[in-house]
Amino acid sequence: MFDLDEDTGASIEIKLYKNVENVKLIRQRLIKGDLNCCIVKPSLIVDPFQIVVAANKAFTSEKRTTKTVFTEILFNLSISKNITNSLKTFGIDDSDNNIIVVLVNERGKDNKHVCSDIQGEELELVLLKNFSDVNAIRKVYKIEDKEFFNVPLLDSVVSRIAVKDFL
């Protein structure tokens, strides 16, 4: 469980799954709005903190760019200001079988049922690094060699997420 800015009263849970057999169904339910969560490709995530920063930004922003807090988290993970590209890049597609589920815990709302339909193996979040694709992350976040070899990857990624609105 990761607490967000205390003024929001919200926290998030991040769950990692591998070998998910029903991604297509989950994606369809997500698009229809039947699942109150955000589902992310683990290959583009360096560390859970990356998701925490995007979620915190979604909750503390005065105005949302997207329709829901869940799509806002995906949008905030991206450096692109194009909503469709952001959702396609960080959201899951039918061919994915490894996923990250981000559950938002707000006062008075229960979302424990969301993960009950996932037909896959839940893993400890510390194993996330085994699913990260450094080359894909570098490409998506436009991290060149000089920066990559001199700055921790997480710092580079989080910096880009934080300053996206100012560029």
Image (tube, rainbow, N blue to C red):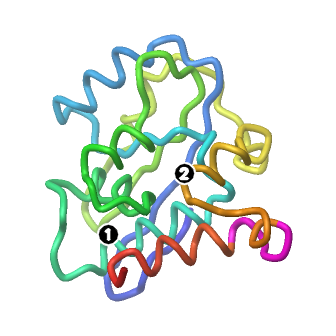
Indicate which disc, 2 or 1, sits on the residue closer to the N terminus: 1
Instruction: Give the SS element for disc 1.
Output: helix
88 sits left or right of 130 in the view = left
Q: Is residue 17 magenta?
A: no
Write down the region rendered in magenta: 149-154
Q: Is residue 152 magenta?
A: yes
Q: As rendered, which of 164 and 42 lies closer to the eye?
A: 164
62 sits left or right of 89 in the view = left
**Callout 2 environment at 10 Å: few (<14), some (14 to 19), or many (20+)?**
some
Q: As rendered, which of 100 and 122 lies closer to the eye?
A: 100
Q: Which mark is residue 140?
A: 2
Write the residue at 49% across / 16% down: 95
Dividing the picture into quadrants, the one containing residue 56 is bottom left
Front tag of 2 and 1? 2
Residue 136 horizontal/vertical position (percent): 64, 43
Residue 33 horizontal/vertical position (percent): 18, 36
Q: Which mark is residue 108?
A: none
Q: As rendered, which of 52 and 86 lies closer to the eye?
A: 86
Write the residue at 42% across / 17% down: 94
Q: Amino acid at mark 2?
A: Val
Instruction: Give the SS element for disc 2.
Output: helix
Instruction: Report the residue that reaches farthest toward the top.
Output: 21
Q: Amino acid at mark 1?
A: Ala
Which image quarter holds the C terminus?
bottom left
161 relative to 68, above or below: below
**Callout 1 environment at 10 Å: few (<14), some (14 to 19), or many (20+)?**
many
Mark 2 to mark 1: distance in Å? Answer: 20 Å
37 relative to 92, above or below: below
16 relative to 81, above or below: above
Write the residue at 65% across / 25% down: 18
Residue 67 horizontal/vertical position (percent): 14, 54
Q: Which mark is residue 58?
A: 1
